[in-house]
Image: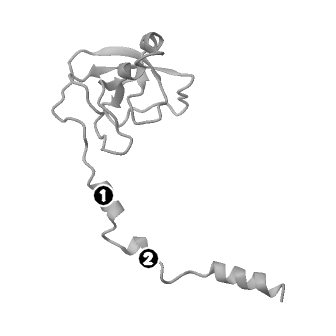
Amino acid sequence: MKKLLPIILLFTACTTNQNKLDKTAVPNDTLVRQSSEEKDISDPSNTLNGKIETLEMSYIVWGCACANWVTPDDFKNYEDDKLAEHCIFIEPANKDLELPMYFDPGRHFIKVTGQFYVRPDYPKGTTKGGGTVGQSESFSLYKD
């Protein structure tokens, strides 16, 4: 009897429950519908300022969806006070631009060329979420 009980428990644990809802069979799943309806919250009327600049930036790991790029000078000047106000968003001008595979935010800087937007904004493609915070200066990256 002692040997039979574990076998019965194993058998019942491995069987499927026919009463469970098959999520793939539900066409109106609210989670799928909600994510597909999320709207880009960046301002489509915001334009680039026309001044091409090259910046050296370092990455800051925040615990939110904040702007997380800062120049080394701004980091040094505002490290103890209001650093977040001097951070910017960086967005690629096209999908071919991305951070190198080996990029380590704690050790590396990037040098980028591009333009700032005229007004503070979110990067293109940002959707409203629980961690979305205020707008910041945004820089459209042309090359790295």
| Residue 91 percent across, percent down from the top left | 34, 31
On residue 90, the disc is none
Q: Quadrant where the C terminus lies? A: top left
Lateral position of residue 5 relative to residue 103, left or right: right
Q: Residue at x 42, y 13 (%)?
A: 74
Q: Quadrant where the N terminus lies? A: bottom right
Residue assigned mark 2: 21
**Label 1 amino acid?**
Gln
Q: Residue at x 31, y 14 (%)?
A: 53
Lateral position of residue 40 relative to residue 81, left or right: left
| Residue 81 percent across, percent down from the top left | 43, 16
Lateral position of residue 32 relative to residue 8, left or right: left
**Label 2 amino acid?**
Leu
Q: Residue at x 31, y 34 (%)?
A: 94
Quadrant of residue 88 in the image?
A: top left
Residue assigned mark 1: 34
